[in-house]
Image (cartoon, rainbow, N blue to C red):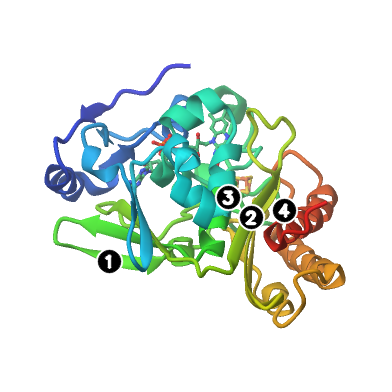
Amino acid sequence: MRLPRFEYLEPDDLTQALDMLASHKEDVKIIAGGTDLLVRMKNQLLTPAFVMSMKQLSGLSYIKNHDDTLTIGAKTTLADIVDSDDIQEGYTALAQAAERVGAETIQHHRGTISGNILQDTRCIHYNQSRFHRSGRQPCHKDGGKICYARDEGDRCYSTYQGDMAPALIALEAKVVLSKKDGKRTINLSDLFTSDGFHPFSIEPDELLTEIILPKQKNNSKSAYQRLSYRSAIDYPITSAGVMINSKAEKIKKARIVVGSMSRAPLFMVKASETLAEKSLTDIDAFKEAAGIAMDNAGTFAVHNAGSTLEYRCDMTFVMVLKALEQAAGIEK
Ligand SMILES: Cc1cc2nc3c(=O)[nH]c(=O)nc-3n(C[C@H](O)[C@H](O)[C@H](O)COP(=O)(O)OP(=O)(O)OC[C@H]3O[C@@H](n4cnc5c(N)ncnc54)[C@H](O)[C@@H]3O)c2cc1C
Ligand code: SF4
């Protein structure tokens, strides 16, 4: 499969990059590691006139520990996140998520955190070659009026299968979006639109430049669990990122986020709240929360991720339960 024709842009610094984005807007796509973008371009799912590389933006590659936050530059590789002692110790879910991203040789050495967060939603009916897609009517995401994943689907329900975002949202991450005339900082959860076709609220002239994580309190622990068929190269079919903050063996705050079950990671408010004031060893409470998360996730999921819906829902329960047990330190 060949890449479509495009003009390659390689800005020397951030100012030049933001100028280029402001000039070309919808006509330009940003390339970080390229492991998501180039596959989509080869499948002719995307044919941008310009591709702007982040190769020379070395100032966006860092992990910095501050008094109240930990900041990660957009171009930081997943390998650097796995290797960071600060992240392993204080933000375990994030290190575990980066470690689980499939295909070690490609993702760990080329895949970046911004590219992972901003990877497109996926669907087994759509993420195929142009030849495969040409044999059937186009779906919503391909410019048509039907959806193969949901009967009478009036819009696109493609699934967000990124590993990092569920862990980052559990850890209450924010992201910095920069453009020529300024920047804004938003909760990572607000970057997601829940629209399979246009999954992110980032503007075409904005560059994600930084991820900000609040300093985790001493008694906070986090964990990430995911399920995929072939762990070495496959996307997750369900996943869970959790954070538990406790005092004197009692849970004060919990955040459960389910991934790969909908058009965006799902923050499970009700399931998280049921854990308040429960003991760190209360397995029944963990099971109840996992059950609520499974039921809620089931209402969003459609059959487009290479496995039956029933199986993905059942395994969501298992992923949430395992992540909670791990964060609570009672993993079997
Ligand atoms: C075989 C295979 C298996 C994979 N398995 C997994 C998996 O298990 N889990 C998983 O999460 N992913 C998986 N991926 C997807 C992908 O490889 C990773 O998510 C990777 O981290 C993407 O990072 P990248 O830097 O290569 O992104 P790129 O391909 O460079 O970019 C991805 C998207 O983000 C946009 N983008 C990148 N950086 C910025 C920025 N700073 N500002 C604005 N937009 C930006 C790009 O324009 C593009 O649309 C897999 C891919 C392949 C080919
Ligand atoms: S969910 Fe439906 S509209 Fe979206 S990519 Fe899949 S088949 Fe197409």
Residue at 78%, 41% (x, y): give it: 307
Horizontal side of 86 relative to 136 (left or right) equals left
Please state which of the two labelled residues, at mark 4 or mark 3, is closer to the viewer: 3
- The residue carrying pointer 3 sits among few (fewer than 14), some (14 to 19) or many (20 or more) residues within 10 Å by Cα, namely many
Q: CA distance from mark 4 to mark 1?
A: 33 Å
Q: Secondary structure at mark 3?
A: loop
Q: CA distance from mark 2 to mark 4?
A: 26 Å
- Position of residue 245 measured from the top left corner of the image (x, y, whole percent): 61, 72
Residue at 42%, 17% (x, y): give it: 2
User: Could you say which quadrant of the image residue 34 lies in?
Assistant: top left
Please give the residue where the numbered disc 3 appears in the rendered image: 160
Please give the residue where the numbered disc 1 appears in the rendered image: 184
Q: CA distance from mark 2 to mark 1?
A: 29 Å
Q: CA distance from mark 4 to mark 3?
A: 12 Å
Mark positioned earlier in the residue sequence (4 or 1): 1
Q: Nearer the viewer, residue 221 or 114?
A: 221
Name the residue type under label 2.
Ala
- Position of residue 152 measured from the top left corner of the image (x, y, whole percent): 70, 57
